[in-house]
Amino acid sequence: MTKASEPAWLVAARAHIGVRENPGPTHNNKLIAFLNTASRFNGVLWRDDEMPWCGGFVAAVLVSAGIEPVKIAARAKSWSTWGSNLRPERLAPGAILVFNREGGGHVGFYVGEDATTYHVLGGNQGNAVSITRIAKSRLTASRWPTGVPVLGGPVRMTSVAGRPVSTNEA
C-alpha cells in the first residue's frame, strides 16, 4: 500500500515489487535494463541477474526519483556512508538501511518495523523485489538523502504472520 506521505523513491520502489530473476540460464532482461539505468554509479554493468543486485536496485530507484546515489552503488556496504545518518529511533519510510550478512552486506528501504525486525523493501530478496523482515541486530547503518526533509517517523507493524525473518538475502 502506497501512502501520500511516502517519498517518491519509495513509491517508485513499490512499483517493482514482484519483479523476479529468471531461474536457470536465461535472465530477466527488463530487470537488467532497470539496474543499468544507474550503471554510471554502480561500478558495474549488469549482464545477468545472477550477481548480487540489492545495491543496484536501490541506486536505480533513487536515480528514477532524481536523487544521486553513492558511487559504487552495487556494493551494499558502500551505502553506509551515503547521505545523512538517520538514528534508528528517527527512521521513516524510505530510509536506506544497510545490514551485515554472511558473505557481505545487504541494502534496502525501510517500510516499517516490529519488535525485533525491520520490514525492508529491497531487491535480491529471495531473488526478487519484495518486502522481507531482517533482524534489527544486523543493522549497520541507516541513511537519508542529504538535504531532503524526513517525512514521517517509525512505522510499527502489527501483523507479521507468515513472514519469516530473512537470514541471507543473496
Image (tube, rainbow, N blue to C red):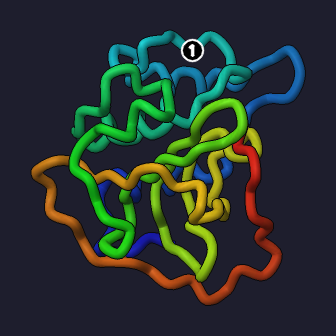
Q: Residue at x 50, y 49 (%)?
A: 108
The extreme bottom residue here reads 158
The extreme left residue here reads 147
* Res 71 quadrant in image: top left
Horizontally, residue 122 falls left or right of residue 85, namely right
Horizontally, residue 166 falls left or right of residue 153, namely right
Mark 1 surroundings within 10 Å by alpha-carbon count, few (fewer than 14), some (14 through 19), many (20 or more): many
Q: Residue at x 40, y 58 (%)?
A: 11
Q: Secondary structure at mark 1?
A: loop
> 52 above or below 12?
above
Point out residue 133 in the picture as x, y percentages from the top left corner. Answer: 66, 64
Q: Residue at x 33, y 67 (%)?
A: 6
Query: From this viewpoint, is residue 33 visible?
Result: yes
> 155 above or below 164?
below
Point out residue 100 in the picture as x, y percentages from the top left corner. Answer: 59, 44
Horizontally, residue 144 falls left or right of residue 20, namely left
* Res 26 quadrant in image: top right
Identity of the amino acid at label 1? Trp
Q: Which quarter of the image is occupied by the C terminus?
A: top right
Residue with the mark numbered 1: 46
Q: Residue at x 74, y 32 (%)?
A: 21
> 140 above or below 24?
below
